[in-house]
Image: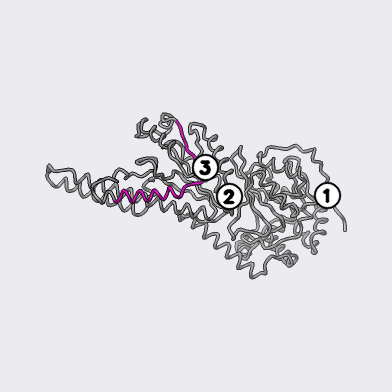
Amino acid sequence: MEKLNWPEVAEESCQSTTKLALIQNLLDEFHKRKILYCHWKSNEHLGASMTGDTDLDILFDAKHKEELKTLFEDLHFKNFKPIPQKQYKNIEDFIGLDFLSGKIVHLHAHFKLTLGETYLKGYQLNYERKILHSRVFDNKYAIYRTHPALELILLFFRESLKIRHRDKLSIYFNKRIHYNGSILKEFHWLRQECSDRELKIILQELVEHHKAIFKFVTGDFNPKELLKLSALLKKEFAGQRLYPPLQALLLRWYREISITALKKLSRLLHRPVISQRINPRGGLIIAVIGADGSGKSTIVANLQKTFSKKLDVYRTYLGKGKADNFSWPRKLLVDLKKTFASTKNKEKKSSPKLNGSTTGKVEKASFYKCVEALIVSFEKRKKLKHISAAKRKGMLVLCDRFPQNQISGYNDGPVLHHLSKENKAVFKAMSKMETRLYDYAERNQPDLVFKLIADARIIQERKPSLASTEMLQSKIEGIKKVQFAEGCRVITIDAALPLNNILSTIKKEIWNMIP
C-alpha cells in the first residue's frame, strides 16, 4: 500500500495574524507544554475562530486531559455543562472571556472523534491518532489543523452520517440536490487544497471499502450523493456506533423534542428554564444598581447579549416597572382605577358641584397607593424566588436594580414605612406587610453588586427627568449608603466613564467571580 509523506512544518516560520489575546495565550501554552492537539474541522473559516466569532473545535490526545484542565484553569476558562440532551460522549465545553475585547471564547474539547446526527452524534471513529499525527501547522494563524485531504474526507463522513430519515424524504420528494452557503464554501476550499492521490492514500489507511468511497469523495458534494455514501458508511462503521439503531432513533427524537420545548418555554415564561449550559459548581447572582440615567438597563442588556450566546442567563427587572410588564393583579388594579375615574367624571358632568370635604378622596387615593405598593412588593418577592431557583440550577442571574430595606421612599426601597405609626389599623397593617416582604430581599442578597455612581448633573444631561438635581443627588447618596450582606462583593463604578470601559471592568469582575 502506498504511503503518504505528511508535511514537515517548522514553527519558527510562523507569521501570525490578528487573534484574540486569550486565544493567542492558549495556543502559546499548547506549544510551550507540547500538548498534542489539532483544530480538526471548519478550517476554511479559521480566522473567525481566532477572533471569537465562531467556536474552536480542537481534538486532543486523551493523555493530556488532566494537564489541560490545569491549563484551562490558569487561563480562566470555565468548564460549563450542557443540558443532558446536548451532552455528547468525550466532548467537553470550556468557555473563556477575552478581557480586552469582552468576547466569549467557546472551546469544544474533543478527546475522541464523536460525530453523527444532530442531537445524537451516534458514532465514534477511531481516527484520533491519524488526525493528530498528520496535522499541519497553519502559518497564518499559528495553529495546528487537520491535513486538508483528511479534513475533506471527514467532511464527507460528517455530512453523510448526519442524514436522518426525514432528510431522506426531503431529498426524495423535494429533489433537494444542492447544499448552499458555508458548507459548500468549505468543500470547495478543501478540494483545492488536496489532490486525488492524497485522498486515495488516506482512504486506503482509513476504511475497508476505500475504492467505492473514493468515488464519492472525488465526486459531487450534494445531498443525493451523500445519501448513497451514508448507506455505505453505516455498514463500514457498524462496529463504531455508540447506540443500537432503535435506541439511537428514540434517543434522538427525545432530545430534539425536549430541546425544542425548552427553548420555547424559556422564551414564553419569564422563569429560569435551562436550555443551553450551566455552571455545575453553582450559579451567580449579579445586581446593577444606580440612580435613573446611570446606565443600569443598558449595561444589563449588554451583559445578557454577551453571556446568553453560550450560557443560560436569567435576567430580571426588580424596579416598579412599566405598564407592559405589570403582573395581572396590578393590571386589574389599574383597570379598576381607570373605570372608577371614568365613572366619577361622568357623575361630575351630570351633577351640580357641591362643597364637601376632600378627606374621603385623599383616603381613597392613599388606599390605592398602598395596595399598589403591596402588589409591587409581592411581585419583587416572586422574582427573588425565581432568582434563587436560577442560581440553584447553575444559571448566571442578571438583576436590573435590587430591593433594599434601608432607605424608604426611593432607590427600590419600601414606600409605606411612614404609615407604620398611622392611627388607622389598615394602613399600619399594610406598612408591616410591605416591610416583611422587603426583609425577604435582605435575606436573599446577590453575590456581586455594581453601584453606578456619577455626578447628578451628568446623569441629568443623559436622561432629563422631572426629578430635581437635589433629589437626584439624594438618590445617588442613598445608593452609596446602601449596605449588603458580608458575603456579597460590592464594586463601585464611575458611571461617567465611557460605556466600553465600564462594560470591560464589569465583565472581568463577573468572570473572576464565577467559580
Q: Earlier in the sequence, mark 1 or mark 2?
A: 1
Q: CA distance from mark 3 to mark 1?
A: 54 Å
Mark on residue 374? none
Give 332 or 222, whichever is nearer the viewer. Answer: 332
| Magenta-span inclusion, residue 438 | yes
First of labels 3, 1 by sequence position: 1
Q: Which residue is mark 3?
A: 489
Residue type indicated by callout 2: Lys
Q: Position of residue 389 (x, y in %)?
A: 49, 55
Q: Nearer the viewer, mark 1 or mark 2?
A: 2
Q: Distance between the Cα atoms at labels 1 and 2?
A: 37 Å
* Helix, strand or loop at mark 3: strand
Q: Which residues are magenta?
A: 429-454
Front residue (pair 186, 508): 508
Q: Secondary structure at mark 2?
A: loop
**Residue ID at (70%, 55%):** 221
Q: Is residue 349 visible?
A: yes
**Residue depicted at 76% across the width and 45% down the height:** 33
